């Protein structure tokens, strides 16, 4: 409502005297001068309304972030119409206005070690607007919760998930939500909508609904600094991470036809004959991503539970080895099986090919590129305990791992396939422990970097 002043009146005299403002910032009280009542009210700024901003203080007059921010006006017909409180990082504090408009109180904790600007809008009994702006600082807290993003900065395939490792475990759902809401991911070109998944109390993975765009710049950053996560635990300052993606590389092995189809940006570049795991050592189905490349690896069967001297034991030098699981599944050169490649599955679980094709594959893939196996009799690649199997969860399953959804940030992932109790319990083809028997979200008890891979 707009009121036009037509001349001096008792109302405007009262209004001028009411413009004097007192802001109570315990233990300090500061009196502020009033605005003039003269001039054209349509051109003038809103008058400096009577209001009171109060926050719990600590030493040095700074606000205690553990105490709420309160705003009130005198019960003289004035009322609060709006309050915004933001820090220098652009974060807003949620709050609730009373039904009578006399008080407003924050409903979310303040950030520690932050500078706040509070803007209070009011109106008097005649509907004239008022405004007040107050600035204050909050005290800093001690050691905080820190986050380390992964992988290392560099260029990766479009299947590479992001990781966030916390310095301290976070169990409570509301605390997890506070953390997750402050882990920001952006991509240029823009990726499909994405979400974080709580693998365990200290580890999160992020992926979009579909693969990252090719030739993208991806940035992960934390805005946790000063944010209250849970009682006496606040976020700290952490470094952002920038990654880049290369071409969209997808290698798909059909275990039924023993052929690998290699695509770049959707175009078939090469088709290669391969061999995969024989019965009892079937290669895992599903989507994996390249973890690392090793030009030479000595592969020993004893490291995966195959006894020396048995018909399946081996100790072989293997070249052009591209790792896709931490437990030892590779795409690699297998010159000893070239007669079977394209015709039969004779390996112990890896994907074998000729030396020339393995070298070509090695040279054309990078970490994060997609390697998929279809039509194998093996189980499905698990999501988190043996590399990056994140893409084997449907998008609806993935969103259940977020603390910001109805799923509530469950720990670990739903199992895609339960082991068949009628199947042989002999060791898995390329690891000492069956991933289906690992606790959700765990890693093999043996350091994956020290596992000796198997030969195929």
Image (cartoon, grey):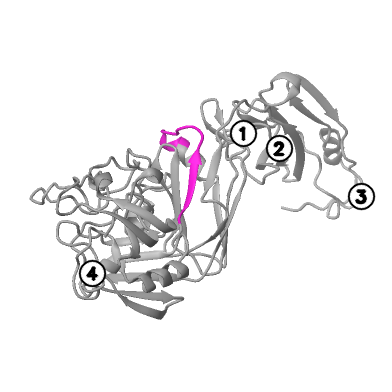
Q: In the shown orientation, is residue 163 left or right of residue 119?
A: left
Q: Are marks 1 and 3 in contact (CB under 8 Å)?
A: no
| Dot 4 or dot 3, earlier in sequence | 3
Of 14 and 280, the residue lying toward us: 280
With 238 as the anchor, is 432 left or right in this view?
left
Callouts 1 and 2 close, C-beta under 8 Å: yes
Per the image, the residue denoted by label 4 is: 255
| Lower sequence index among marks 2 and 4 | 2
Q: Nearer the viewer, residue 266 or 293?
A: 293
Q: How dense is the environment of label 2, judged by Cα within 10 Å: few (below 14), some, or many (20 and up)?
A: many
- Circle 3/circle 2 CB separation < 8 Å: no
Mark 1 and mark 3: Cα distance apart in space? 40 Å
Q: Residues within 10 Å of mark 1 (few under 14, many from 20)?
A: many
**Residue 95 percent location from the top left of the image:** 58, 38
Q: Earlier in the sequence, mark 4 or mark 1?
A: 1
SS type, badge 3 = loop
SS for tag 1?
Answer: loop
Q: Secondary structure at mark 2?
A: strand
Mark 1 or mark 2: name the one nearer the start of the chain: 1
Instruction: From the viewer's side, name the closer residue of 145 and 313.
Output: 313
Q: Which residue is mark 3?
A: 39
| Neighbourhood count class around disc 3 (C-alpha, 10 Å): few under 14, some 14–19, many 20 upward | few
Query: Which image quarter: residue 43?
Result: bottom right
| Residue 173 part of the magenta segment | yes
**Residue behind mark 2:** 116
Residue 83 spot, x, y in % from top left:
66, 41
Where is residue 239 shown, x and y percent of the image?
62, 45
The magenta-colored residue range is 161-175
């Amino acid at each position: 409502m707009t009121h036009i002043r037509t001349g001096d009146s008792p109302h405007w005299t009262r209004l001028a005297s009411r413009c004097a403002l007192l802001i109570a910032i315990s233990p300090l009280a500061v009196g502020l001068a009033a605005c003039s009542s003269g001039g054209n009210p349509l051109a003038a700024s809103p008058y400096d309304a009577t209001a009171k901003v109060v926050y719990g203080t600590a030493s040095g007059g700074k606000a205690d972030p553990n105490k709420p921010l309160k705003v009130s006006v005198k019960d003289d017909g004035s009322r609060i119409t709006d309050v915004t409180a933001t820090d220098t990082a652009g974060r807003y504090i949620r709050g609730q206005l009373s039904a009578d408009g006399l008080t407003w109180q924050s409903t979310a904790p303040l950030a520690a070690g932050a500078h706040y600007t509070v803007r209070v809008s009011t109106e008097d009994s005649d509907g004239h607007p008022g405004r007040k702006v107050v600035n204050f600082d909050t005290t800093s807290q001690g050691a905080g919760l820190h986050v380390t993003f992964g992988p290392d900065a560099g260029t990766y395939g479009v299947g590479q998930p992001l990781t966030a490792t916390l310095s301290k475990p976070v169990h409570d759902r509301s605390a997890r939500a506070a953390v997750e809401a402050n882990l920001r991911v952006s991509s240029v070109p823009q990726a499909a909508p994405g979400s974080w998944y709580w693998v365990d109390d200290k580890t999160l993975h992020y992926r979009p609904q579909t693969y990252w765009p090719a030739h993208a710049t991806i940035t992960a950053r934390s805005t946790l600094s000063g944010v209250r996560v849970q009682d006496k635990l606040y976020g700290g300052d952490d470094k952002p991470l920038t990654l880049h993606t290369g071409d969209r590389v997808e290698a798909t092995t059909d275990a039924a036809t023993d052929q690998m189809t290699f695509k770049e940006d959707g175009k078939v570049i090469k088709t290669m004959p391969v061999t995969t795991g024989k019965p009892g050592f079937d290669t895992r189905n599903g989507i994996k991503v390249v973890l690392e490349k090793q030009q030479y690896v000595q592969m020993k069967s004893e490291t995966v539970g195959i006894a020396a001297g048995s018909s399946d034991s081996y100790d072989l030098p293997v070249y052009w080895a591209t790792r896709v699981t931490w437990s030892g599944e590779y795409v690699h050169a297998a010159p000893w099986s070239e007669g079977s490649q394209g015709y039969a599955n004779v390996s112990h679980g890896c994907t074998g090919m000729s030396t020339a094709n393995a070298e070509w594959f090695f040279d054309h893939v990078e970490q994060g590129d997609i390697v998929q196996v279809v039509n194998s009799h093996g189980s499905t690649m698990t999501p988190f305990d043996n590399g990056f199997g994140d893409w084997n969860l449907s998008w609806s399953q993935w969103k259940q791992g977020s603390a910001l959804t109805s799923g509530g940030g469950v720990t670990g992932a739903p199992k895609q396939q339960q082991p068949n109790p009628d199947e042989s319990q002999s060791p898995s083809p390329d690891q000492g422990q069956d991933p289906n028997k690992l606790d959700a979200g765990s890693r093999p008890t043996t350091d994956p970097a020290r596992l000796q891979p198997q030969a195929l």
